[in-house]
Image: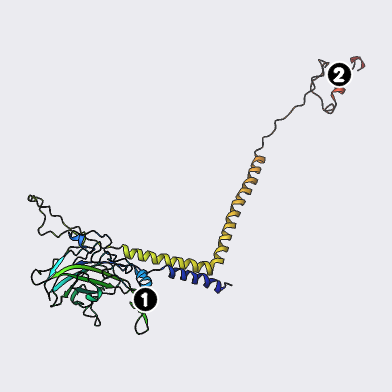
Amino acid sequence: MINRRKVTAPLATLFLLMAASIEPTAGHGRLIEPPSRASAWRYGFSTPPNYNDHELYCGGFNRQWQKNEGKCGECGDAFDVPLPRPHEFGGKWGQGVIVRRYKPGSTITLRVELTASHMGYFEFRICDNVQAKQDCLDKHLMKIVSGTPSIPHPNDLKTRFYPRNGSRIYDMKAELPADLNCGNCVVQWKYIAGNNWGICPDGNGAVGCGPQEEFRACADVSVSDKDGQDNRTPLRPGQKPTPTRAPDSSTEPAAGEEPIEEEPPKGVTYMGPLVAIMSLFLVLCGFAALYIYHYHGGRIKALMRWNREKTQTQRVEPTATAGVAAHRDLEANAPVPPPRTKRISNQIRDIDAQESSVLSGSTKHQSPLDIVSVSRKPSGLD
């Protein structure tokens, strides 16, 4: 009889270890229109490169919520980093380089690239001061006019965009305040993820409630009637420009003109789902192994013991049988000794020439001395 307490205790310990080892998965995303301070170098601006421009998540979930009590730098840096923070004005990437020029009250294009989507929503703010403190940014929360791809919901707020189509590039249209006029404004992108479980304001628990991962980014722009212009949409980082004419092998490019190359086709990426399926399969195999071990371990061990004993018996029996058969073959094939003829000893010297050298039957059992005495008997006595 299996003790269920002994079975339950290891399983409970396993669940606790798995729960303790699970950490919130860090998503990845960047603001690419207007290009953020961390991503401007990708579009030809003379700013320091930041190869981790998709990881401005306030230092990470644990650092933000356990160490900094949910606080975050305005541009995605960890709150406890010394001022000026790297992506704020005066920091390594906060150089105030203008990347876009807009007109007041115009509808601008906003573009975000998510390489690992975790639901949630986007918000966009703008401040007319290059220092861009959060209280200034909160004064101008932009209204989202449209966005693609989009799966609208009746309860969606007009100031938020909800990325419900997974990891991809999202295009949005937003309205600038009509009374905003500044030579060096700062656009802030804020992404509040929604994949963690937490307690909602009504007291119920659900995914998306409670503390969540958070991304932020800042971009330097100008808003003015004087030099405002339509925003230019950057290409995706690493993407080649789409050719305006079909390539012709018979036509040589003009001097100073680069040959036009076709953009390679983009295939569907299956690595993420494949890794998830394999991980789930390994977890299920682990639970199956634990179940079999605890509930059917005795039977399996008995079967293995029986199989081992049977194998050993099969190895011993052929050896004994082979030894007996070999012994019988030796007895059957033993050589037959040749017939032997008894001869008189070479010590007998005086044998009568007329006497046969072959012993008769009556003398068959006589000793050589008797034979000698007989042979020396005088012939006259006969």
Locate the C terminus and report the quarter of the image it occupies. Answer: top right
Determine which quarter of the picture holds residue 199: bottom left
Name the element at disc 1. strand
Label pair 1/2, CB-CB below 8 angstroms: no
Residue 108 in view in this figure: yes
**Tag 1: amino acid:** Trp
**Tag 2: amino acid:** Ser
Q: Position of residue 214 (x, y in %)?
A: 30, 71
The mark nearer the N terminus, 1 or 2, is: 1
Which residue: 75% across, 27% down?
341
Q: Which residue is mark 1?
A: 197
- Label 2 neighbourhood size at 10 Å, few (<14), some (14-19), many (20+)? some
Say above or below: 186 vs 318: below
Q: Position of residue 24 (x, y in %)?
A: 36, 69
Locate the N terminus and report the quarter of the image it occupies. Answer: bottom right
Which residue: 43% across, 70% down?
19
Name the element at disc 2. helix
Q: Position of residue 208 (x, y in %)?
A: 33, 77
Question: Left or right: 292 with respect to 67?
Answer: right
Question: Left or right: 91 with respect to 22?
Answer: left
**Numbered disc total:** 2
Q: Position of residue 2 (x, y in %)?
A: 57, 72
Say above or below: 283 vs 157: above
How far apart, in angstroms, are the residues tagged by discs 1 and 2?
A: 131 Å
Out of 296 and 357, give the one closest to the viewer: 296
Which residue: 34% across, 83% down?
201
Q: Which residue is mark 2?
A: 375
